[in-house]
Image: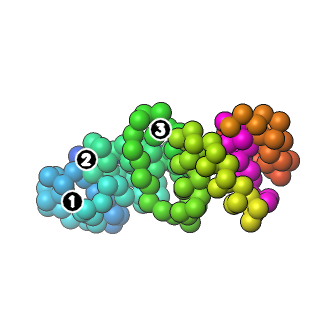
Amino acid sequence: AKNELSMSVCSGAFILAQLGLLDGRPATTHWGAVPRLKAAFPKVQVKTDVRFVDDGRIVTTAGVSAGIDGALHVVQRLLGDDVAWETARYMQYVWEPQESAALPAPAKEALRALIFNDADRAVSLLSAQSAKAPKDVQILSRLGRARLLRGETKTGIQTLESAVALGDVRPITL
């Protein structure tokens, strides 16, 4: 009850349901366990055909691979898009998060270019975004890192310093 966030993978939803933590809440589990979860815990709002359900304090996921999506979603929620994408890249996991207000399509395309080391494309896309939003610290941070990746040490550092001067204190920028 005091946890900031609890997450289950696959049939781990049954443990949360047994504790009463899913009563009246949406949740999911492995497709093969959905009928059993519905029957055993009628107060749970069981969702099907979704990879995970985020209900604020509780995240439940479908099967094991959906657990990876759920875990990356939690990383995204707690640490931001950049860290989640870098984590997926490090794992060599093809992650396609749902588009959100925090990461609209143009930002997703630019972040993908940065994470996959396409420095020229990342600088091009992020420069265009920065021209439209010159005080957006997240765009400046990404642009600075892209410039460093492209070998533009001086301008990359200057861009990162601009982000910090505007208040960006995230470790990824610092």
Q: Which callout, 2 or 3, points at the residue further toward the start of the chain? A: 2
Say what secondary structure mark 2 lies in. loop
Residue 163: % across, % down: 79, 48
Say what secondary structure mark 1 lies in. loop
- Examine the structure image and report whether residue 135 is included in the region drawn in magenta: yes
Closer to the camera in the image, 64 or 134: 134
**What residue sits 76% from the left and 62% below the top?**
131
Q: Quadrant of the C terminus?
A: top right
Residue wearing tag 3: 89
**Amino acid, disc 1:** Phe
Measure how far apart labels 2 and 3 are at the Cα level. Answer: 21 Å
Residue 108: % across, % down: 54, 56
Which quadrant would residue 120 be assigned to in this image?
top right
Judge whether residue 84 can be spotted in this image: no
Q: Looking at the image, do the residues carrying marks 2 and 3 touch, with CB atoms under 8 Å apart?
A: no
Q: Which residues are magenta?
A: 134-149
Q: Is residue 151 left or right of residue 8?
A: right
